[in-house]
């Protein structure tokens, strides 16, 4: 339990993200610029060689790059491989 929290804090520090963002119903990690792991997604909203988007709770995670493909997909968990250029989370506006 402590190891998990310190790992998440380390990832948060490296990414410049708040720890609550990483553990708020989803998390994602990029390894070596060529592998993205996302946990807690709610489905694919866009899929192509240059862009892959996942629906998240109240947001969308968009991966852009080249030769992107989903290597593994199951409910709430996915692995995207390819040349990853950027990862962006867009939050829905609250009305």
Image (spheres, rainbow, N blue to C red):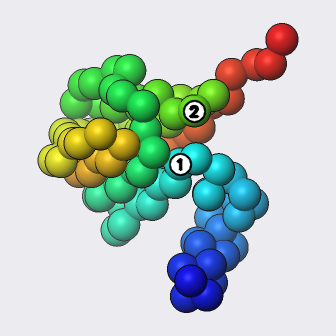
Q: What label sits on residue 35 in the rendered view?
A: none
Q: Is residue 14 visible?
A: no
Quarter of the image for the C terminus: give it.
top right
Of residues 9 and 2, the one nearer the viewer is 2
Q: Residue 44 placed where, x, y %?
A: 34, 26
Residue labelled with disc 1: 26
Of residues 25 and 81, the one nearer the viewer is 25
Q: Is residue 87 above or below residue 17?
A: above
Q: Is residue 31 above or below residue 2?
A: above
13 with respect to 95 (left or right): left
Quarter of the image for the N terminus: give it.
bottom right
Q: Is residue 37 visible?
A: yes
Which residue is drawn at the image coordinates 45% and 45% (left, top)? 40
Which residue is drawn at the image coordinates 28% and 24% (left, top)? 47
Residue labelled with disc 2: 57
The alpha-carbon separation of the residues under discs 1 and 2 comes to: 8 Å
Q: Are marks 1 and 2 in contact (CB under 8 Å)?
A: yes
Q: Residue 48 placed where, x, y %?
A: 25, 25
- In the rendered image, the residue lying farthest to the top is 95
- In the rendered image, the residue lying farthest to the right is 95
42 with respect to 17 (left or right): left
- In the rendered image, the residue lying farthest to the bottom is 3
35 with respect to 88 (left or right): left
For disc 2, the neighbor class at 10 Å (few under 14, some 14 to 19, many from 20) is: some
Q: Secondary structure at mark 2?
A: loop
Q: Residue 23 placed where, x, y %?
A: 62, 58
Q: Residue 60 placed where, x, y %?
A: 53, 29
The quadrant where residue 2 appears: bottom right
């Amino acid at each position: 339990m402590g190891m998990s929290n310190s790992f998440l804090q380390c990832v948060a520090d490296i990414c410049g993200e708040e720890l609550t963002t990483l553990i708020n119903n989803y998390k994602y990690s990029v390894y070596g610029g060529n592998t993205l792991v996302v946990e807690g997604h709610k489905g694919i909203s866009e899929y192509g060689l240059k862009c892959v988007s996942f629906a998240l709770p109240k947001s969308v995670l968009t991966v852009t790059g080249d030769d992107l493909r989903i290597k593994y997909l199951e409910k709430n968990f996915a692995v995207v491989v390819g040349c990853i250029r950027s990862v962006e989370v867009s939050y829905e506006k609250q009305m």
